[in-house]
Structures are given as structure tokens and as C-alpha cells.
Image: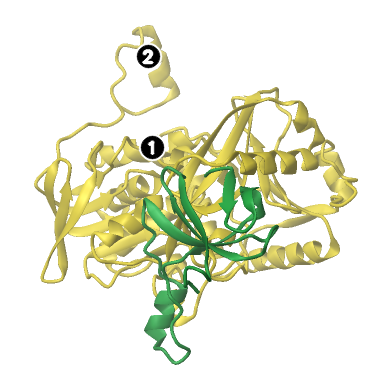
Chain colours: A green, B yellow
Amino acid sequence: MASLISCPHCGMRPKEEFMIRGDAAPVRPSAMASDEAWHDYVHLRNNPRGRVREHWQHVAGCRRWLLVERDNLTHAVFSVADAAAEGGQ
Amino acid sequence: MRYSAFSIFKQAFAGNLGWKPAWREPDPKPHYDVIIVGGGGHGLATAYYLAKEFGLRNVAVIEKGYLGSGNVGRNTTIVRSNYMLSGNEPFYEFSLKLWEGLEQDLNYNVMFSQRGIINLYHNDGQRDQYIRRGNAMMMEGVAAELLDRDALKKMMPFLNFDHARFPIMGGLLQRRAGTARHDAVAWGFARGADRHGVDLIQNCEVTGIRRENGVVTGVETTKGFIGCNKLALAAAGNSSRVAEMAGLKLPLESHVLQAFVTEGLKPCIDHVITYGAGHFYISQSDKGGLVFGAEIDGYSSYAQRGNLATAEHVMEEGVTMIPGLSRVRVLRSWGGVMDMSMDGSPIIDRTPIDNLYLNCGWCYGGFKATPASGFCFAHLIAKGESHHVARALRLDRFERGFPIDEAGAGTQPNLH
């Protein structure tokens, strides 16, 4: 993993300022969705090797939620964007 | 060849020219009763117990690299059974009992050393928590002792008892816990399985799982198609990728865990010691190096290497607990890919596909479980039902609301 992450609001910051929530692929189902849909969202992960999109929070900076695209085999970071601006949740 | 003191003398007088390879290197047969994917500790132990305890000898272990090239050769070698929850404790105690007879059983020196593990506590709340854990252990018939500060000072005077923020008040001791030589465990099980007729096929990567009418008929590999009646997955950090070949989505996320070893020292740390104010564990190998590690790096990863920031954090914890460590030089560090499950506990179970069996989710506690994992997985494959100590380790426990969350961290794999 890169030691420096480029926050869209704060610029280059050390990786330790960020908290990693995890895979951004699961989408929260509606409150009335089936148990299967909730099980899938809460517990199951594709866990791919290679490019992943993750939710990070810049907890020691702007505290914004971010969408980080990176490679989990080479640890290269491709892009960091504000999650709200990306339309993520 | 049976290993013994006599065989060593005999070979010494014969110029050590008579030693044979510990296992064969066979070409894969077209069909096996059982194929195990993954030639690590758990896969090899499964093959060994399948052949020895359950009489299934037409078995192959398929490994993409060399035997023991994954986490069994990358861990900090700690063996213990000091768990709290009733779904875990009997399983790990069964494992510890298998460890106690393993060397005689395998006729192989795995250098199992029951030097004891001590979990330090630093405040009243933590002490109460350890009392609870010790009581839970004793209810399962496992001995645990609570040591106060004075008793601990006699045992390990080098600890930083009077740290300003995290003074050491005492610890929970399990005397039967200890360490083992990790590579030797893989080699011992490999040799034992081979002696019972199991084919160990190395440098053979599974590239696909062939299914017909809903059941698995075999695996596509880099050495061609190999048929099987039953397929068992023990692929650790790569479990999700192998299971995906059969259309399964697992409650796993792969993470990287780092470990470290220092230069060799004279005997100075006699036990396994864990730090309660953070997460740090240390022991001394028989070669003299201090072997230690801490938490996972915290981001999903398939790389067998981690970040320097985590290394710094680990060293800080170590030096806070044992100030003398600051004078020791670290020789090497390495990383392994952990199959982190959603509750921090493993899975040994059938899958929705009838003849496909699953062994995964060991997080970073799989080494101590190696014998019991193999035994219970073999039991499941051979008899079609779970061994009684592994009944809670089900794949559907998440869906049904019965997680075994030892850390109480919830469904967040990077927090277990």
C-alpha cells in the first residue's frame, strides 16, 4: 500500500490517517428486503484478487467518506474520490 | 523408513547415504475418491487422518506451489486452547490433545514445546474478563491459572510492570500451551499421509471445478483434468477464489498479517507472552530468535507482504511490554494471506453442493488448529457428518444468527 494517500479535500496525507471500512461493492438493501438479501449484504464478499473499490474514511483529516480504488495484490492505489461526489453510499 | 535414535546412529555409520526422501512425487492419477485442494498444514492433516483414521487411501492433495508454502510456514507457531466461547473451546482443546501425542503418532519431531502461554492484563476490567475466560475454560475441563503481579514478577522480571499508561497487573496462564516447529508440522503430516498411500501433487494449480448435474466430478488443473468423488477445499487465503470456481460466495475477506524474527539470543523468554493493552505476542524459537507478531494490517490484500507502518506499531507494542527488546535487531519480516471470516471463527462444513466440502476462515489462528482441523474435516468427508467438537463451525451460522464472535467485533473482518 502506498504510504501517502491523496485525499481529494486535504491533499497528500499519510495512510495512517485513514480508516478502512471495507469493500464498496455490497449495496445496502431496503429495510424490508428479504433475509437472503440482508445476509448477502452483511456477510458475503466476492473477495476478488486484483482491483477493488473500498470505502475509507479520512478520520484524522476532513472526516469525509472516500471511495478508494486500488489493487490488493500489488498494493497500488489508482484513485481516491469523495464517496458522496461519486454517488456512493 | 522409521525415524529413531537407532536410525540416526545407523545412518551416521553408513555416511548418511541411506536417507530416503520423506515422500514420493507421484504423477496424478485420472481419478481419486477424495481430492483435497491445498497442501498446507490443514490439507495435509486432512489427508493424513482420512487415510489413517477413516481408511480412505485413494486420496490426493493438490498444491499450487510446494508443500507448506503458505501460512503453515509463515506463522508465529503458537499452540493454545484458551478460548472462551463454547463453540470454540472444545474444538481447540481437542486440537491441543492431538498435539500432545502428535510426534509419536507421526513418528516425526515437530518440536512441540509446552512452555505455557500468559495473557497479560493491565486494568481491573481486563482482569475480570480473563477470570471469566479462565472459568469458561475450566468448565470445558481445561486448566487455567490467574497470576497476580508478584507471581508474574518472579516468572518474567523483564516485563515493564510500571508503565505509566499500561501497568501490568497480572496474567492468565495456560501451562499446556506452547509452540511447535511450523514447517516440521507440514512435513510430518505430508510424510505420514504419503506413508498411508496419499498422493501429494505439488506445483499443480487448480484452474477450474467441473460440475455435472449439480455435483462436482473433478478439477481442472495445470496438469490436466483429475476426477474425484468428493472435493475438499483447504485453500486458506485463496478460499474465496477456489470456491468461486464452484459458484460459491463465502463470508470471507483476505487480509495480510505480518510476523517478525530477531537475531538469535541465548534463552531469555521462556513462555509465549501476549500483551493485553494492544495485540502483540512473542516467544523464543529453539534457534534463539524472538518470533513475534501483532494484528493484521487492516486492508484486504492477497500480497504476502505488509506495510512498514504496521511494522512500526508492532515494534512499539513489543518495546512497551519488554523494554529490553529495543536492543535486539530484527532479522526478517514476512506476511501471509489470512482468510478472515465475518465472526473471527473458522468454517468446517458441507456446502450447498453435495460432494463439495469446505475448510476455511481460520483468520490468523489456524496453526494451533492444524491437527483438529484435519481430523474433523476428515471425519466430515468420510462420514458425511460433523465431528462433535466442530459442530458449531458451520457455514450457515451467519445466516441463521449463530456467529461465534470471540472478539465481539461484529461482522467486520478487519477487526477480528
What residue do we see at 38% from left, 7% from top? B13
Look at the image and tell me in which quarter the N terminus of chain B lies: top left
Other-residue count near label 1 (Cα within 10 Å), few / some / many at <14 / 14–19 / ≥20: some
Residue labelled with disc 2: B10
Query: Which of B185 and B62 lies nearest the eye of the viewer?
Result: B62
To which chain does the residue with label 1 belong?
B
Left or right of B4, for residue B163? right
Q: Is residue B243 visible?
A: yes
Query: Which of B158 and B104 lies nearest the eye of the viewer?
Result: B158
Residue labelled with disc 1: B69
- Indicate the amino acid at tag 1: Ser
What residue do we see at 44% from left, 34% from top? B184
User: Helix, strand or loop at disc 1?
Assistant: loop
What residue do we see at 38% from left, 35% from top? B187
- The answer to whether residue A5 is above or below residue B129 is above
Query: Which of B317 and B181 lies nearest the eye of the viewer?
Result: B317
